[in-house]
Amino acid sequence: MKAQKVSAKSTAFYIIGLLVFSAIIVIASVSLITRDALFLIDNGLLAVSMLLSVFFVLVVTYVYAVYIIRPNYKVTSQFREYIIVNSIITLVIVFSSILYSSLSPYAVPIAAVSLLVAVLLTQRLAIVCGVSSFVIMMIVCPSVAYAQNGAVSFMNLYGLIVGLISSICMTYIVHRGYTRFKITAGALAIGAVVSLISIPFVITEHDVTFIDVLKEVMFSFLGNAIAVGVSSVLLPIYEHIFRVWTDFRLAEVCSLNQPLLRQMREKAPGTLSHSLTVSILAENAAIAIGLNPFMARACAMYHDIGKIKNPQFFVENLDGGYNPHDDLIIDVSVKIITGHPEEGAEILRAKRMPDTIVKAALEHHGDSTLMFFYLKAKGITEGDLKTDEYRYSNPKPSTKYSAIIMICDMAEATIRAKKPTTKEELEDIVSNIISGRILDGQFSDCDISLQDLSKIKESICTAMPSMLHQRIDYNKAKERR
């Protein structure tokens, strides 16, 4: 994929912004380390050299992120990513400067940069940002120490190196399936290991006692614990302000206590039950083809949210009773049924849901034909009847998530209606659904492959039997006894 084009005007804007971030970092960090507001004024040449050095590091990070890393992923807009990365680096370095001067260089929590960027954006970018933060600390802290004392303590440098090791290790605990507990436990485990690594660095100093070694080891562990605490505080703030949909936030929107899902439970309980089943199938399918299961589940939970506007016109909410379509002309029924994807997309846009979830709601039927109403109309119409008037008028799936929801949605409804009794019957149903959608051209706008479709079929056929299992009637069993 080609790197996205950045205009000269926007590049100039970003570069000026980096200069501002550099100035904030240098002024705030040096002032906190020296506790002297006039230090930079008295050491003008040093201040300028630090500013230019920090600016250079941020520029390299920006160029690397935009032109090398970013073409491989799309998490959020470039501007939001720019603000997220640089504000995290700035906040953590300024906070680290406080701990550097008041506690120990081993206590600096620069690992928080890697942890936050890994969760909010990507692991690869997190490593780059962690290294950049380390380099900036190496520029600022030794420079100030040298200006004050005419020498730089090796322990101060070693403390920052230990922080870099923690920072890099932190990125590897953010993997698929991570939870808040796993991240916290993993970070503390890394802190315990890294604190032991700090021992050789500490004992290289002259006149170091056992108490000094123990103290620095404790500070090293404390730095990782503080990094976890800082990340825990800042993460929900960044998620909310910048609308970054992490796995944590996606899991939250799938909770049945969410307002939209509560509304669905009250107005369209059958649709909610259907969505819950589809969410299990979609989650398994996403895992099978290497997609984010949290996003797939969220797409499934909300794909039919548009039905809450007219729940009584959808079969899963009829409960075997009166069917209002019996009293409607076919064209009206078709209009009501085909309107729910767009209505759902409008609801989700109003709630500022992720574009992927909105697309799944809008595209999960594509422009497929409502065969039930088409055949019903054909039975009372003389001559040929075109299918165009009995199709959904929505876009075809443009993402793999939408394609998964399309397949799982129809598979759940069809399997529940036909109730296959053998594995072969189940496989035939799913195969016919997928092949029918391929022949109808529904997957022509997304990059899903035949191998992906085969894995999706396998995941559905594996999961569905356990969801349709029969239970023992214990009352009849007692009667037999």
Image (tube, rainbow, N blue to C red):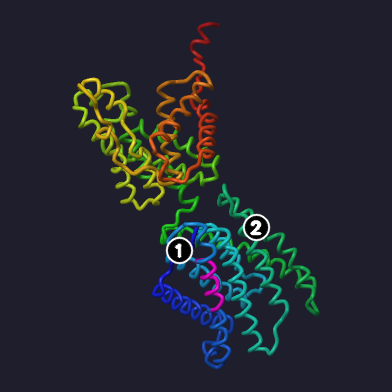
In space, the residues marked 1 and 2 are separated at their CA atoms by: 38 Å
Residue drawn at (65%, 65%), measured in percent from left and top?
A: 222
| Circle on res. 438 | none
Amino acid type shown at disc 2: Leu
Q: From the top left corner, tell me how far across and down residue 295 is, in percent.
A: 47, 46
Q: Foreground residue, 274 or 458?
A: 458
Q: Residue furthest top?
A: 480
Which quarter of the picture shows residue 322? Answer: top left
Residue drawn at (52%, 80%), measured in percent from left and top?
A: 28
Question: From which residue to which does the magenta span run?
Answer: 56-66
Does the magenta stretch mainly form a helix, a strand or a loop? helix
Q: From the top left corner, tell me how far across and down residue 142 is, in percent.
A: 65, 82
Q: Foreground residue, 74 or 318?
A: 74
In the image, is 236 to the left or to the right of 261? right
The mark total stands at 2
Q: Secondary structure at mark 2?
A: helix
1 or 2: mark nearer the eye: 1
Q: Foreground residue, 229 or 63?
A: 63
Q: Which residue is mark 2?
A: 188
Q: Which residue is mark 1?
A: 4
Residue drawn at (52%, 19%), measured in percent from left and top?
A: 422
